[in-house]
Image: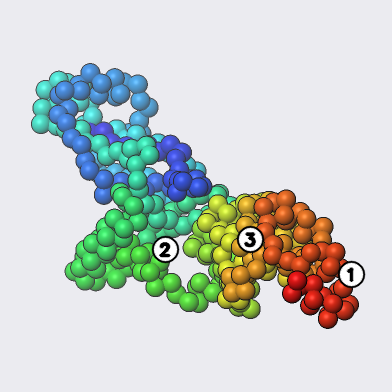
Amino acid sequence: MYASGYAMCPWAVSDGVTDIKVLGFPVPDTFPEERWDAELYAAEIRQYMQQTRFTKLSKFAVTTMLSKMKELLLEDDGALREDWLFEDAEDVLQRESFRGLYCMEQIVAEDAEVCVIGTYSAQKRGLVQDLSTGGLQILPGGSAAALHSLRARGVWYFIFSLMFLAAGSIGSYYVLQLRETRDPEVVEKHEERFLVALEQNDLLAAEEALARGISPNLIDPTSSQALLRVRSVEMLRLLTSYGLQLNQADTYGNTPLAAAFHKKAWPLFDMLLAAGADPNDFNRIWQTTAAENAYDRGQFELYDRLLQLGGKADVVPREAAYFHRDDPEKLLDVIEQ
């Protein structure tokens, strides 16, 4: 090998809802290699050699190469390029030197279905290298294919670690196990941080917790929906981008809209309506609507607004309910009619 190098430009992965920047350098070693004879591209190789500014290395400059590899592993700015020229590289300029050589390329195509595993940095707002959890990895296929690949690699790393008595070499499998077993103490810690972030309207801290796998539909220790702690439209949008279900019911059958109504959290109530919460999906147990609850509490302005938003209500005529609200017998007569 006469010349070597690597290059990375800013890129991101998307789940169809949000984009996550990848700021580290995951080596695409699990993607297929394409090889071709160097002789076929002699002109292009010469042009590359003549136009590129190289870092010159001795073939035995192991320390320098390791230092460069360390820079590669710790890269977190999203753009990196290194071109190395070894002491024998001048031979490449001679045509006969191409015989028996080949070029190799591994490509992750744009819009390809991949799974990227890494540590999310709230400060840099992207995935970065974290060698303590197996490093940044990119695997072909969706989550199922990625899990299969990680398990296979985990077994190989485990055998390798036994051979060399290096227990720390199963980092990739550790990443998988962390996501499958979900250590309760770790999860609880991140859930607590998530709840505090919602109360303090700390978007960065909330996004960091969500990126670590905390559900936007979390039910807190008091059996209330974490969503009730939301203080801003921006936070609601963030939760929605991570899969918030606006009409998910809690253990009491209340949807977020119902919970906000009962807690008189009117700013959140209005935000939920604006975000598309269904006013007719209020309590799953009692099968009531938001308009019916507003009517029962005498909140007639809210009742009218909910009807304008498509709300439905099976209620006693307002005039009868109003004029007979202090006379149960007359009110009962009106209902029976």
Q: Tell me the mark number nearer the camera, choosing from 3 and 1.
A: 1
Residue with the mark numbered 1? 323
Residue with the mark numbered 3? 280
Q: Amino acid at mark 3?
A: Asn
Q: Quadrant of the C terminus?
A: bottom right
Q: Is residue 294 left or right of residue 257?
A: right
Q: Secondary structure at mark 1?
A: helix
Please state which of residues 102 and 138 is positioned toward the viewer in this rendering. Answer: 138
First-in-chain label (3 vs 2): 2
Look at 37% across and 37% down and name the residue there. Answer: 110
**Mark 3 crowdedness (10 Å alpha carbons): few <14, some 14-19, many ≥20:** many
Q: Amino acid at mark 2?
A: Ser
**Mark 2 crowdedness (10 Å alpha carbons): few <14, some 14-19, many ≥20:** few
Q: Is residue 21 left or right of residue 230?
A: left
Look at 46% across and 52% down and name the residue there. Answer: 128
- Work out how far the residue at label 3 is from the one at label 2, CA to CA, in angstroms: 49 Å
Please indicate, yes or no, whether residue 105 appears anywhere in the rendered image: yes
Residue with the mark numbered 2? 132
Quadrant of the rendered structure where residue 36 is? top left
Label at residue 31: none
Please state which of residues 251 and 84 is positioned toward the viewer in this rendering. Answer: 251
Look at 62% across and 74% down and name the residue there. Answer: 286
Residue 258 at x, y percent in the picture: 67, 67
- Work out how far the residue at label 3 is from the one at label 1, CA to CA, in angstroms: 27 Å
From this viewpoint, which residue is outermost toward the bottom? 329
